[in-house]
Image: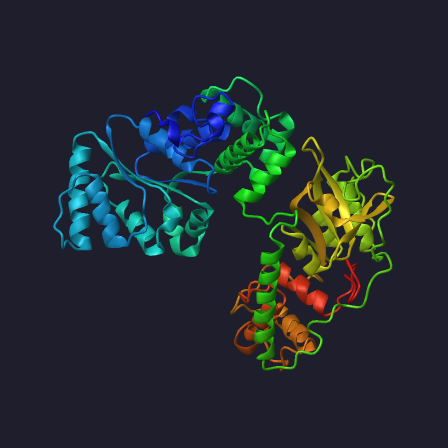
C-alpha cells in the first residue's frame, strides 16, 4: 500500500528517494534474508516435515524472528492448518481458548480446561483423518509462563498410533531458551525436533542490508560511505532493527544539515539521540546543575538516616601505584585546538597492544602472541569488565581502562586512560604518554571500554540475594571495614542485615541497590576499601 506524502520522512525528497528506506514497519518489499536468516527458515521448514514435537527459534530483540515467521507462514503447504498466536501473555485457559479460536473450533464461554482440550483433540483427530496436519506458531513465546509451556507439552501428547496430532513452533528471545533448558521444563526440551538461535548480521551483511533497502527505495547514489557502514555495524551490533533506527536518524540529520552523505558526526549524533545519551557539548547547564543538586539532596537525606557508623565510606583510597601519576597540564603547540585528538598519537593501535599497556599498570607483562587478554588476566588473579558506559562511570570505578576510539574513517583504535582529573586526562599508548583536555575524546568515544579488577579467585558468578558461598564472608568483612555492618563470623547467606548493608552501599555509590554482588559492585567495594591496584586519581584529587 502506498504511503501518503505526509507520512514520509522529510529526507525522502531531499535525497531523491521514492519511499522510506528504513521504516521498521514489516514491508515485504524490503525483506532482506541473510545467510543466517535463510538457515533459520530452513530449520523451521524442516521442523514442519516432522510429526509432532516442538521447533524452537530464538534471537535477540530486533534480529528478525518475526520476519522469518512471516516467511514461514507464506511457505506453509496447503495441507497444513496453521494457528498463529502473536500475544501469548495468557494463562492456560486463555491459551486453549485462543488455539480453538484460531482453528475455528466452537467452544462454550464457560468451558473448562478439560472441555477445551477435548474439543481440540476432536478437531485434531478429524483433521488427521482428512490427511491434514495442524501447526501452532507462537511468537514472543518468552512471555509464556512455565505452567503454560507445560500445558503446551501436554498438548503434544495428543496422538494416534502413527503420529502426533499437533506441531508447535516457538519463537522468542534468548530467555525462552534458558527457560526451556531449565530443570522444570526438561521434558519439553526433550521434545525439540529442531532449534536455531538467530544471531546478528556480520559486517558484510550489514553493508548488503543497507544497500538493499536503499535500492528498493530508489536510491541512485552513495549515501553511506563504507567507513560509516562499518561504524553502524559496530554501534548496532548487527541488529537489523537498530540498523534501521540509526540509518533513518542519520539521513534525517544529513537533511537538516544539508549534507549530501553521512559522516561520522551525523552517526554520533544519531546514536546519542536513539539511545538518549547526554550531549557532550555543554548544553542545558542549568538543568544539569538542578538535577545534580536534587540528587545530592536525596543522597544526603538517605545518608543521614543510615543507622550504622559510616566512617570511611566516602573516603577515596590513598594507596596509588607509582605508575598512576597525576594528570598534568596539557601542552599545546598552537597548531591544533587544545581539545583535538593529536594526529600522531595512538591511531592504529590494536586492542592487544592497548591491553599490554593496561596490564603493565597492574605490574604484569602481557605478550599478545602467547595468550588472549582476559584469559591472561584470569590466570593473574584479575578479571575483565567490558561495558559501554559514561566517563562518570569510569570515574566512579577509579581504575585505568582501555578505551575504544574511532578515527575519521570510522576505524577503531585503542588507548589506555591512565589518569583523570575533572577536565584533563592522561593517556598511554606504547611508549608514548599524553596529557590532554578530556574533550579530546568527545567525537571519538562511544563509551566502550575494558578495565581490570582484582578477583582473588573468589568471584565466579554474581551472588544474588539469598545466595550462599565464601563471597558472603568476604562481603561481610569489607562492609564491616567500611562501617556499614557488624560482622558476626556466622554469615553464610546474603540476606537480612547483610543484604540491607549491601544495598545501602550500592545506593551511596550511585549503583542500582538491587542487592546483587557483581563485578560493578565489587569494583566499588574494592575502591572504597583501599584495595591495591592502579587508580585514575589520588584521594581528593580529581
Q: Residue at x 44, y 47 (%)?
A: 177
257, 206: nearer the viewer: 257
Residue 413 is situated, as x and y percent measured from the top left of the image, at 73, 38
221, 404: nearer the viewer: 221
Residue 409 is situated, as x and y percent measured from the top left of the image, at 69, 30
Q: Could one spot residue 371 in this view of the protein?
A: no
* Quarter occupied by residue 100: top left
Residue 440 is situated, as x and y percent measured from the top left of the image, at 74, 44
Is residue 416 toward the left or the right of residue 245 in the image?
Answer: right
Residue sticking out furthest to the top = 220
Q: Quadrant of the C terminus?
A: bottom right
Q: Quadrant of the N terminus?
A: top left
Residue sticking out furthest to the front = 286
* Quarter occupied by residue 9: top left
- Above or below, comparing residue 470 to residue 234 in the picture: below
Is residue 255 toward the left or the right of residue 337 in the image?
Answer: left
* Quarter occupied by residue 40: top left
536, 108: nearer the viewer: 536
Total labels: the figure holds 0
Is residue 99 toward the left or the right of residue 248 in the image?
Answer: left
Amino acid at each position: 500500500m502506498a504511503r501518503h506524502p505526509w507520512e514520509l520522512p522529510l529526507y525522502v525528497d531531499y535525497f531523491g528517494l521514492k519511499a522510506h528506506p528504513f521504516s521498521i514497519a514489516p514491508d515485504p518489499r524490503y525483506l532482506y534474508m541473510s545467510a543466517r536468516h535463510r538457515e533459520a527458515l530452513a530449520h523451521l521448514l524442516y521442523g514442519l516435515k516432522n510429526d509432532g514435537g516442538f521447533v524452537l527459534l530464538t534471537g535477540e530483540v530486533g534480529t528478525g524472528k518475526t520476519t522469518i515467521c512471516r516467511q514461514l507462514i507464506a511457505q506453509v503447504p496447503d495441507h497444513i492448518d496453521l494457528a498463529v498466536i502473536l500475544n501469548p501473555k495468557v494463562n492456560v485457559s486463555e491459551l486453549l481458548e485462543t488455539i480453538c479460536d484460531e482453528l475455528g473450533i466452537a467452544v462454550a464461554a464457560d468451558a473448562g480446561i478439560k472441555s477445551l482440550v477435548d474439543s481440540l483433540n476432536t478437531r485434531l483427530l478429524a483433521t488427521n483423518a482428512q490427511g491434514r496436519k495442524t501447526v501452532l506458531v507462537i511468537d514472543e513465546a518468552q512471555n509464556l509462563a512455565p505452567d503454560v509451556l507445560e500445558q503446551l507439552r501436554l498438548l503434544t501428547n495428543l496422538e494416534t498410533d502413527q503420529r502426533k496430532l499437533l506441531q508447535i513452533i516457538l519463537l522468542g528471545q534468548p530467555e525462552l531458551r534458558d527457560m526451556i533448558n531449565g530443570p522444570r521444563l526438561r521434558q519439553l526440551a526433550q521434545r525439540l525436533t529442531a532449534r536455531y538461535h538467530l544471531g546478528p548480521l556480520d559486517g558484510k551483511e550489514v553493508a548488503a542490508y543497507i544497500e538493499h533497502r536503499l535500492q528498493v527505495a530508489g536510491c541512485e547514489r552513495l549515501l553511506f560511505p563504507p567507513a560509516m557502514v562499518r561504524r553502524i555495524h559496530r554501534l548496532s551490533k548487527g541488529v537489523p532493527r537498530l540498523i534501521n533506527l540509526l540509518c533513518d536518524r542519520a539521513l534525517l540529520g544529513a537533511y537538516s544539515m544539508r549534507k549530501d552523505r553521512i559522516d561520522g558526526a551525523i552517526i554520533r549524533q544519531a546514536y546519542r539521540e536513539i539511545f538518549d545519551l547526554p550531549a557532550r557539548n555543554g548544553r542545558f547547564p542549568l538543568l544539569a546543575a538542578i538535577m545534580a543538586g536534587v540528587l545530592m539532596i536525596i543522597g544526603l537525606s538517605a545518608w543521614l538516616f543510615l543507622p550504622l557508623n559510616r566512617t570511611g565510606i566516602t573516603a577515596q583510597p590513598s594507596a596509588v601505584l607509582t605508575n598512576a601519576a597525576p594528570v598534568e597540564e596539557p601542552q599545546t603547540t598552537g597548531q591544533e585546538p587544545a581539545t583535538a585528538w593529536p594526529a600522531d598519537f595512538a591511531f592504529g593501535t590494536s586492542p592487544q597492544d592497548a591491553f599490554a599497556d593496561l596490564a603493565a599498570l597492574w605490574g604484569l607483562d602481557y605478550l599478545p602472541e602467547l595468550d588472549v587478554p582476559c584469559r591472561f588476566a584470569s590466570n593473574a588473579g584479575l578479571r575483565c569488565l567490558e561495558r559501554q558506559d559514561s566517563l562518570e562511570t569510569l570515574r566512579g570505578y577509579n581504575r585505568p581502562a582501555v578505551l575504544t576510539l574511532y578515527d575519521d574513517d570510522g576505524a577503531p583504535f585503542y588507548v589506555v586512560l591512565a589518569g583523570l582529573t575533572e577536565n584533563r586526562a592522561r593517556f598511554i599508548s606504547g611508549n608514548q604518554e599524553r596529557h590532554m583536555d578530556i574533550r579530546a575524546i568527545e567525537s571519538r568515544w562511544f563509551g566502550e571500554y575494558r578495565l581490570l579488577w582484582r578477583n582473588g579467585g573468589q568471584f565466579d558468578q554474581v551472588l544474588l540475594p539469598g545466595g550462599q558461598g565464601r563471597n558472603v564472608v568476604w562481603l561481610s568483612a569489607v562492609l564491616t571495614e567500611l562501617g556499614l555492618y557488624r560482622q558476626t563470623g556466622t554469615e553464610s547467606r546474603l540476606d537480612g542485615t547483610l543484604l540491607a548493608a549491601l544495598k545501602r552501599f550500592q545506593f551511596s555509590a550511585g549503583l542500582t541497590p538491587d542487592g546483587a554482588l557483581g563485578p560493578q559492585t565489587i569494583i566499588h567495594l574494592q575502591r572504597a576499601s583501599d584495595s591495591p591496584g592502579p587508580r585514575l586519581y589520588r584521594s581528593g584529587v580529581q
